[in-house]
Structures are given as C-alpha cells and as structure tokens.
Image (spheres, grey):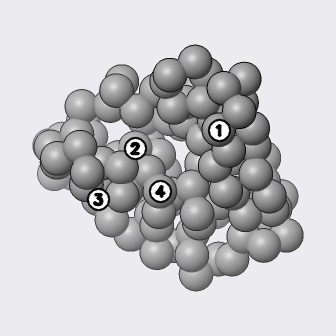
Amino acid sequence: MTDIATTGRALPHPAREQIRLESVLHALADPIRLEIVRELAAREVDLSCSQFDLPVTKSTTTHHFRVLRESGVIRQVYRGTAKMNGLRRGDLEGLFPGLLDSLLAAADRQAARLGRNG
C-alpha cells in the first residue's frame, strides 16, 4: 500500500493486515527508534523528520524512519517538501491490543529509572 501526497511522491507502507508482530518488536527494539515513537506518542501530532533531535547522522536517521515505516509502526507522507511522520496507533492497537501502550509505559519507566527524559 502506498500514500501519495500532494507532491505525487509515494512511500511504501504495509497494509494493516500485513503488519507482523516480529517486525514491530524489531523496530521498537532499537533505542533511537523507540525514542522516535515515544516522541510521536507524547506529541500526538505528525512531526517532520527535522523536528527530531537525534544523536545520529542524517543517513542513519533516514534508516531509522524507514525501518519504522516498513514495519508498520509509523506512516510517512510528504507535505510540500517535508516528510511528515505519524504513529499508526489505530492499526497497532487493532492488531495487538495494549502492546504499544505497554511498551511506551515500560520505556517511560526505564527512562525514569535511568534518570533520562528520553
């Protein structure tokens, strides 16, 4: 399944029925990707890639967003020249009830335990 934004550029996304648990868990096992998802969940709005302050190179950032998109965790669409990222909360909750909220709560507890906000 693809989404075509106003610019006509399409990004491939798995259809809801194609999202697999092991792909979601793999995507969220990386600390950088988990932080991206935590921020999207906390803000509850679509964010452009440039709104994330990640401690990695631009090419590595691109890789992390691609893994999240291809696993079905986020949806990316172009708005003008910005690539916007949104959490696929409804799809994930429909397929794996409670999983995302449990993982986010665990990540929050870990961050607090380690003395980090993110």
Amino acid type shown at disc 2: Ile
Local SS, label 3? helix
Q: Nearer the viewer, residue 57 or 29?
A: 57
Q: Is residue 23 above or below residue 52?
A: below
Q: What's the residue at 59%, 66% (across, down)? A: 71
Residue 23 lies left or right of residue 15; in this view the side is left
Kindly indicate whether the residue at mark 1 contacts the one at mark 3 (C-beta within 8 angstroms). Answer: no
Of labels 3 and 1, earlier in sequence is: 1
Q: Earlier in the sequence, mark 4 or mark 1?
A: 1
* Mark 3 burial class by Cα count in 10 Å: few <14, some 14-19, many 20+: few
Q: Is residue 5 left or right of residue 28?
A: right
| Mark 1 closeness class: few <14, some 14–19, many ≥20 residues within 10 Å | few
* Residue 31 image label: 3
Question: Picture coordinates of residue 58 (x, y %)?
Answer: 23, 43
Given residues 61 and 101, the one toward you in this image is 61
User: What residue is shown at x 55% (from left), y 30% (from top)?
Assistant: 84
**Residue 49 relative to residue 40: left or right:** left
Spatial CA distance of label 4 from label 2 is 12 Å
Judging from the image, what secondary structure is the residue with disc 2 in? helix
| Residue 52: x %, y % from top left | 32, 31
Foreground disc of the pair 4, 2 = 4
* Label drawn at residue 36: 2
Identify which amino acid the numbered label 4 is placed on: Arg
Q: Is residue 45 visible?
A: no
**Which labelled disc corresponds to residue 105?**
none
- Which residue is labeled 1 in the image? 9
Residue 77 drawn at (x, y percent) = 63, 35
Residue found at the far bottom of this picture: 22
Q: Say whether disc 4 or disc 3 marks the residue closer to the N-terminus.
A: 3
Q: Which residue is mark 4?
A: 66
Amino acid at pointer 3: Pro
Q: Amino acid at mark 1?
A: Arg
